[in-house]
Amino acid sequence: MSSSPARTKLEYPLAPHYPSYWLGERLTALAASLFADWQVEGEARMPKSGPIIVAANHFSLVDPPLLAASIPRQMSYLGKAELWGNLIGRIFSRGIGIIPLRRGQADRPALRTALTVLEHGGVVGVFPEGTRGRDHPRRLKPGLPGIALLARLSGAPLLPVGIAGTDAIDRPSDLLTKAFTRPRFRVVIGDPFDLPVRQPRDLEADTALIMTAIANLLPERYWGLYTGDAVGR
């Protein structure tokens, strides 16, 4: 990288600077409380200050707002650049602190911005699978190594989060039809951890470790490729 995180211009301001983040978080919490059986476990495991990377599974379109409402600190997200494709998308994405990520390529601007957020003691939310996919039933997909690279370059600890039950919401129309059945959402926050010292660096092994930590917080039906107890609760 051509410049250090501390000197990199923050291209997209931190989410806590925006009242729209606070409003969206509150509205999501209200909707989840009214129309779903939503419970969060382990809020006290979230460090009260300092940089941290929140790593969660991604089964549904409701995962990003539900994660924001479940985590007791505001965060910036790495989200697909397509969200910035029009004026409304740009306003929305900037308002809730989404860092646009060009998927399928080495996006250095996105990485630099995420590193700057962490350098300022902020929180970066990442869905390591990259996309929620369309498989049925939902299971963890292979994690992408970008989150491991971000953790290695920043030195920030990782906070695994398991989100279960949101796979009941598969498309936007489900938000209305499933509201009458009160789907059961469970968000489990795990213990923060640091990646082990490895020489040479092995991003594939690091990514598998992160994904296993997420799997350990989910019911077995969601595990997919990731099983075992490499990182416990």
Image (tube, rainbow, N blue to C red):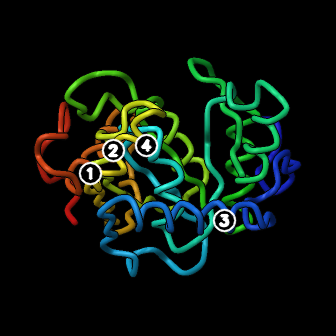
Q: Which residue is mark 4?
A: 176
Tell me the crowding category of disc 2: few under 14, some 14 to 19, or many 20 or more residues within 10 angstroms, Cα based.
some
Instruction: Mark 3 vs mark 2: give the one in front.
Output: 2
Describe the element under mark 3 as helix, strand or loop.
loop
Left/right placement of residue 23 relative to residue 178 reads right
Q: Which residue is mark 1?
A: 181
Residue lying at 43% horizontally and 61% vertically, measured from the top left: 32
Is any part of residue 37 visible from this angle? yes
* Residues at marks 2 and 4, CA–CA distance in whole angstroms: 6 Å
Kindly indicate whether the residue at mark 1 contacts the one at mark 2 (C-beta within 8 angstroms): yes
Kindly indicate whether the residue at mark 3 contacts the one at mark 1 (C-beta within 8 angstroms): no
* Residues at marks 3 and 4, CA–CA distance in whole angstroms: 34 Å
Describe the element under mark 4 as helix, strand or loop.
helix
Left/right placement of residue 135 relative to residue 117 reads left
Residue lying at 61% horizontally and 37% vertically, measured from the top left: 79
Amino acid type, mark 2: Lys
* Residues at marks 1 and 4, CA–CA distance in whole angstroms: 10 Å
Look at the image and tell me in which quarter the N terminus lies.
Answer: top right
Q: Position of residue 219 (x, y in %)?
A: 15, 51
* Residues at marks 1 and 3, CA–CA distance in whole angstroms: 37 Å
Residue lying at 29% horizontally and 63% vertically, measured from the top left: 37
Q: Which residue is mark 3?
A: 122
* Residues at marks 3 and 2, CA–CA distance in whole angstroms: 35 Å
Amino acid type, mark 3: Gly
Left/right placement of residue 13 relative to residue 34 reads right
**First in sequence: mark 1 or mark 4?**
4
